[in-house]
């Protein structure tokens, strides 16, 4: 991977990238299902009906927000307008905002759960701690946090992904777990699971936690 030194703003790169590949991304999962819905079920099984769920980096809303919206209210934030347009079609009852998960604002204690699948690795890692602290603030007491993030270590790097340049940034899994705890969460389930993307095995760290 290249580093970012000459490439400008990572957010614009990611926004442009996902605007371009929204359709191809929707087809990427294929037959070998990713573990996202199994993890989401753990959250949904713990929520009362009519709960309020925030999805950071919601993408097209398919499949997670479609499932969440069956019994709960869902709010999604995504930096790609193309993804937000798809989410509004896929989940008519949802509230979808074109914005940056790193700077979006919500009132304290607004949500019963915050989820984020496969997104934080597209945001500079030096911001991950602040995002976790803000998610903690947005949650009601006992609120749930579910995150998946690539289980690698990238220091603000650019690689080609689905034919476009894409930004990647994440700390190693042990550091990420520590950051979740330091943000005020009780981490009660975490593992690294490998999923298949275009025939390639990609490991993701899963973090399931509760606002302590
Ligand atoms: C790999 S896709 C995952 C989409 C969806 N969460 C899923 O489970 O399929 C990553 C998503 O994160 C969004 N994203 C990346 N950086 C973001 C940021 N700073 N703020 C909001 N969304 C972001 C991208 O536009 C893209 O839709």
Image (tube, grey):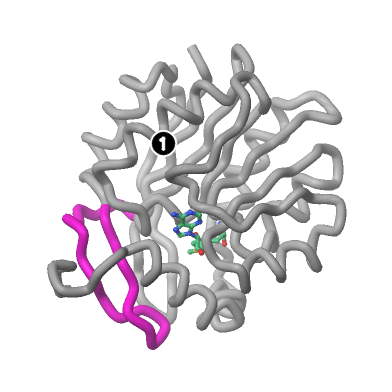
The residue shown at (73%, 26%) is 47
Q: Does residue 116 appear to the left or right of 163 in the view shown?
A: right
In the rendered picture of this protein, how many numbered marks are placed on residues?
A: 1
Which residue shows up at 55% across the image and 83% down it?
24
Location of residue 200 with respect to 55 vertically, above or below:
below
| Depth order, front residue of 114/177 | 114
**Residue 174 colored in magenta in the image:** no
Q: Which residues are the magenta region?
A: 150-169
Could you tell me what secondary structure mostly forms the magenta stretch? strand
Counting from the top left corner in percent of width and height, residue 201 is at 35, 69
Report the residue at 52% width, 60% height from top: 79
Residue 30 location (% of width, % of height): 58, 77
In the displayed structure image, the side of residue 84 where residue 22 appears, left or right: left
Residue 168 lies within the magenta run: yes
Mark 1, secondary structure of its residue: helix
- Position of residue 117 relative to residue 158, above or below, is above
Residue 159, by quadrant, is: bottom left
Please say if 83 is above or below 154: below
Tell me where residue 84 sits by quadrant: bottom right
Left or right of 134 in this view: 125: left
Residue drawn at point x = 41 percent, y = 36 percent: 131
**Crowdedness near tag 1: few (<14), some (14–19) or many (≥20) residues, C-alpha within 10 Å:** many
Residue assigned mark 1: 131
- Image x and y of residue 82, in percent: 62, 73
> Residue 10 location, x and y as percent?
32, 64
């Amino acid at each position: 991977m290249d580093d970012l030194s000459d490439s400008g703003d990572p957010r614009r790169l990611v926004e442009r990238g996902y605007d371009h590949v929204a359709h191809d991304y929707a087809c990427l999962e294929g037959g070998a299902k990713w573990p996202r819905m199994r993890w989401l079920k753990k959250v949904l099984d713990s929520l009362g009906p009519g709960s309020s769920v925030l999805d950071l980096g919601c993408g097209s809303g398919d499949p997670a927000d479609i499932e969440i919206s069956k019994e709960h209210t869902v709010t999604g934030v995504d930096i790609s307008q193309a993804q937000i347009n798809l989410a509004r079609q896929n989940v008519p009852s949802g509230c979808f905002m074109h914005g940056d998960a790193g700077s979006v604002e919500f009132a304290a204690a607004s949500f019963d759960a915050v989820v984020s699948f496969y997104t934080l690795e597209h945001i500079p890692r030096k911001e991950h701690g602040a995002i976790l602290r803000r998610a903690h603030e947005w949650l009601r007491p006992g609120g749930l946090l579910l995150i998946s993030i690539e289980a690698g270590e990238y220091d603000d790097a650019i690689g080609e992904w689905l034919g476009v340049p894409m930004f990647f940034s994440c700390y190693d899994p042990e550091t990420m777990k520590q950051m979740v705890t330091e943000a005020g969460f009780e981490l009660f389930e975490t593992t690294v699971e490998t999923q298949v993307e275009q025939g390639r095995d990609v490991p993701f760290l899963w973090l399931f936690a509760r606002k302590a």
